[in-house]
Amino acid sequence: LVTDLGINLSLGFDWYSRKAKKCPVTFVVLEGSGGLSKRLQAWEKHFGETIPDSYKVFVDSFSLMNSNDITQLIAEINCQGQSSGLIVIDTLNQASPGADENSSKDMGLIIQNAQRLARETKCHVMLVHYTGKDASKGLRGHSSLIAALDVSIEVKRDGSGRSWSISKSKDDTDEGVHHFDLKKIMLGSDPDGDPISSCVVDGAIHRIITNKQKKPQGAQ
């Protein structure tokens, strides 16, 4: 879902009926990097669009606990013309090795460095993070994290159904649940003849559910 959001922003395409302003996107992939290339290929094949050069992937080691890493990433983003856009850090856990998520000190340093990254690149910084074992209690770790966020997008899976919603928004509405499916896309086969595939976000189910929920009009 985050990959799909980032690609649409890099192209300036509306996303779930929300207007998008075209901007550079930097994806810091610290978990599952092996499958990202296939996801990007699947997106291009399914939607018939070429992902622009302004969508860049960073796969080197990176820590939000290390000021030198922050300095280097800031320099790289600004040097490559990726400022004034979106930076995705996937995931917060992998970007904070050795940190205690429940420690106010450690979480405070993570937040401070993420804010510095945003400030010195003029970018929005998106942190991909997990809920705890009890999803109803929200994000894993110290409460200072949710307090520092401008927006929190919560992704859920209920059986075969998937959805996202805005669980926190400082300056906008947080209403509505948005449904989606993952559609399998065949990319070819490997040297042994086994199929290679990936998946893309398909929002068609959202339109179906939304239409069913509309109240009937006119006389009954």
Image (cartoon, grey):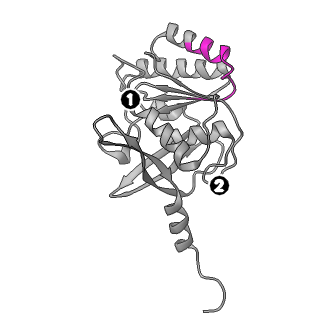
Number of marks drawn: 2
- From the viewer's perspective, is residue 10 above or below residue 78? below
Residue 219 location in percent, x, y? 65, 91
Q: Is residue 23 above or below residue 17?
A: above
Question: Eyeballing the image, is 82 above or below 203?
Answer: above
Amino acid carrying mark 2 in the image: Ser
Query: Residue 181 appears in which quarter of the rendering?
Result: bottom left
Residue 80: x %, y % from top left = 65, 17
- Label 2: how many residues lie within 10 Å, few (<14), some (14-19) or many (20+)? few
Q: Residue 61: name its quadrant.
A: top left
The residue that appears at 69% across and 41% down in the rendered structure is: 12
Query: Magenta segment: does it hold 75?
Result: yes
* Residue ID at (33%, 39%): 132
- Please identify, in this view, whether the residue under mark 2 or under mark 1 is nearer the observer: 1
Image position, residue 98 (x, y; %): 33, 16
Identity of the residue drawn at 52% across and 73% down: 212
Magenta-colored stretch includes residue 120: no
Quadrant holding the C terminus: bottom right
Q: Where does residue 71 sit, x and y in percent of width and height? A: 57, 10
Circle on res. 34: 1
Highlighted range, magenta: 73-87
First in sequence, mark 2 or 1: give its number: 2
In the rendered structure, find residue 17 and report the number of the disc placed on it.
2
Q: Indicate the quadrant where residue 17 lies.
A: bottom right
